[in-house]
Amino acid sequence: MTGKLETQNPAGIEKRSFEIITQELGDRHFSLEQEPVIKRVIHTTADFDYADSLYFSPEAVEKGIAAIREGAHIVTDTNMAYSGVSKKTLEGFGGEAHCFMADADVAKEAKERGVTRAVVCMERAALIKAPLIIAVGNAPTALLRLCQLMEEGKIDPRLIIGVPVGFVNVVESKEEVIASKAPCIVARGRKGGSNVAAAICNALLYQASGRVL
């Protein structure tokens, strides 16, 4: 009975979940930096496909952790991802989380210009004077506009988390981010989501603060 009680509290449930993930991954080996990210995404989604589909540019995790420790701001494309980010941990490093999607002026500008709110949100992100981590879990148009802004020299994110989910422009936008050579963590293919974006952010935040899983 004691064992069952241990898995009825949040810490016990999380510990046991990661034990199961480790067991089911078997003899798969990942780098020390990437492993916590992969496992936290699997923990969030119960989808082991991410062990194969998550793409990491060279030293992506290390660059994300360094940015966090320098007070990076995290900009998400959905309020769901924003809500999921451990803001207390981020603020401990002097950083801040942002999501502009629900701002009335963003909606107004997007309607007037005939673009998505995600496009306007990336333009707002470009105005932030701080190291930036961009976490996109829903809108491929956010990634496409982000790539344009980088080409125009208007934004230089320290890390892009590109994990939108869906069918239209999803795969293409992710591959464009990879082709840009910007530091990135990308879920190749159609899968992703705001929960995945938040999970990756938190995996980086926990590593930055010394908590691995």
Image: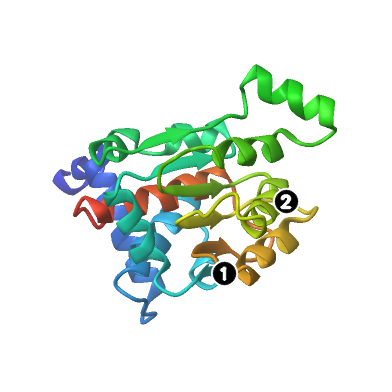
Work out whether 173 lies above or below 8: below
Answer with left or right where residue 168 lies relative to residue 71.
right
The spot of residue 200 in percent (x, y) is: 43, 53
Residue bearing mark 2: 166
User: What is the image's colouring?
Assistant: rainbow
The spot of residue 79 in percent (x, y) is: 54, 31
Which residue: 62% across, 56% down?
Answer: 150
User: What is the secondary structure assignment of the residue under circle 1?
Assistant: helix
Answer with left or right where residue 114 lies relative to residue 175.
right
Which residue: 49% across, 72% down?
Answer: 57
Residue bearing mark 1: 53
Q: Do we see residue 8 in this rendering? A: no
Q: Do we see residue 57 in this rendering? A: yes
The C terminus: image quadrant: bottom left
Answer with left or right where residue 186 lies relative to residue 208.
right
Distance from disc 1 to disc 2, alpha carbons, whole Å, reads 15 Å
Q: Nearer the viewer, residue 204 or 42?
A: 204
User: What is the secondary structure assignment of the residue under circle 2?
Assistant: loop
Answer with left or right where residue 168 lies relative to residue 151.
right
Within 10 Å of disc 1 (Cα), the crowding (few <14, some 14-19, many 20+) is: some
Labelled disc at residue 104:
none
Disc 1 + disc 2, Cβ < 8 Å:
no
Q: Amino acid at mark 2?
A: Gly
Which residue: 39% across, 55% down?
Answer: 40
Within 10 Å of disc 2 (Cα), the crowding (few <14, some 14-19, many 20+) is: some
The spot of residue 120 in percent (x, y) is: 68, 35
Q: Amino acid at mark 1?
A: Ser
Q: Nearer the viewer, residue 192 or 133?
A: 133
Q: Farthest top residue? A: 104
